[in-house]
């Protein structure tokens, strides 16, 4: 059984002491490829070093995370543009909008998000979209920028059936993580009506660990727990979830040997 963690931050300092063991545990659980979204200029070097250490099991994305959009966002975007020109990235990410923590940079976030969507189209790369308290804003911008070349994943999807349908109609996929296992989450009900082919798996490690590890450090090996829960929700075998989500991830991110 082969799995792809389409969104994991294993390069962060939370894994500094046991990074190799974390990767080994993931491989033992069938997680063969881990996609690493960038956050901002400060995270870039650590992400690149992780990929150099585990080149056969990781790929990197380049983007500016919405919570890092501040006064210097134009300088940050210039770095994103420069890095993407190298051709070393599998996607533009993590990009999007986040109005949960801070709305003071709302217009900056809009500009940064739209600019990075345009970069994705220029470089013919998929996008990994962070959406928090901003679905309507993001949906409107993606719809305006939509072309045949624009595709990707709405990362950490926890929305409504109506939002899921809107995303699928755009031609995008839903990134499903640990929230699916939370007791009071209604995500399972939503996903029961979503075709499996429109879903990919992710951990967002070290954040949002699935039950029974909720509240603790998340890691890519826990992707199997999410896959097992999705199999239960969709009433299919675990192998079917693994096969379908891995194939979808391979198509979106142009993964070889998948």
Image (cartoon, grey):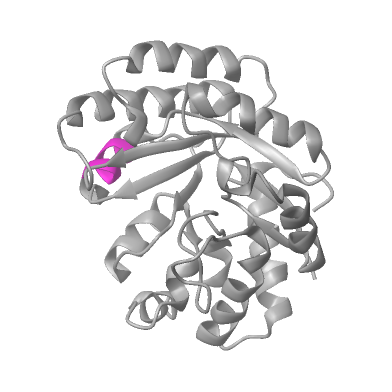
Range shown magenta = 137-143
Judge whether 165 appears above or below 120 on screen.
below
Judge whether 166 appears above or below 67 on screen.
below
Image coords of residue 247 (percent x, y): 70, 59
> In terms of image quadrants, where is residue 190?
bottom left
> In terms of image quadrants, where is residue 158?
bottom left
Q: Is residue 61 left or right of residue 26?
A: left
Q: Is residue 81 left or right of residue 236?
A: left
Q: Residue at x 30, y 61 (%)?
A: 163
Residue 149, visible in the rendered structure: no
Image coords of residue 85 (percent x, y): 61, 14
Q: On the rendered image, what quadrant is the N terminus found in?
A: bottom right
Q: Residue at x 38, y 83 (%)?
A: 183
> In terms of image quadrants, where is residue 25?
bottom right
Q: Is residue 101 left or right of residue 159?
A: left
Residue 257 in the magenta stretch? The answer is: no
Which of 239 and 49 lies nearest the eye of the viewer?
Answer: 49
Residue 74, visible in the rendered structure: yes
Q: Residue at x 34, y 34 (%)?
A: 66
Q: Residue lying farthest front?
A: 17
Q: Please, what is the dominant secondary structure of the magenta stretch?
A: helix
Q: Residue at x 46, y 71 (%)?
A: 214
Judge whether 54 appears above or below 25 on screen.
above
Residue 142 in the magenta stretch? The answer is: yes
């Amino acid at each position: 059984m082969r799995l792809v963690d389409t969104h994991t931050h294993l390069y962060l300092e939370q894994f500094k002491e046991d990074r190799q063991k974390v990767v080994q545990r993931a491989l033992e659980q069938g997680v063969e490829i881990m996609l690493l979204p960038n956050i901002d200029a400060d995270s870039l070097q650590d992400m690149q070093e992780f990929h150099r250490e585990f080149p056969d099991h990781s790929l990197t994305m380049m983007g500016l995370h919405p919570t890092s959009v501040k006064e210097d966002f134009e300088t940050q975007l210039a770095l994103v543009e420069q890095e993407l020109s190298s051709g070393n990235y599998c996607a533009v990410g993590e990009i999007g909008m986040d109005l949960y923590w801070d709305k003071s940079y709302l217009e900056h976030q809009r500009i940064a998000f739209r600019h990075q969507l345009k970069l994705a189209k220029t470089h013919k790369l998929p996008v990994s979209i962070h959406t928090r308290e901003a679905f309507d804003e993001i949906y409107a911008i993606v719809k305006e920028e939509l072309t045949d070349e624009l595709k990707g994943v709405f990362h950490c999807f926890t929305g409504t059936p109506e939002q899921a349908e809107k995303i699928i109609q755009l031609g995008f996929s839903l990134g499903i993580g640990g929230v699916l296992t939370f007791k009071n989450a209604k995500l399972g009900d939503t996903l029961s009506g979503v075709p499996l082919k429109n879903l990919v798996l992710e951990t967002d490690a070290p954040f949002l660990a699935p039950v029974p590890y909720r509240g603790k450090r998340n890691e890519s090996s826990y992707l199997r727990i999410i896959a097992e829960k999705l199999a239960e929700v969709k009433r299919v075998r675990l192998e079917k979830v693994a096969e379908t989500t891995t194939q979808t991830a391979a198509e979106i991110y142009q993964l070889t040997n998948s």
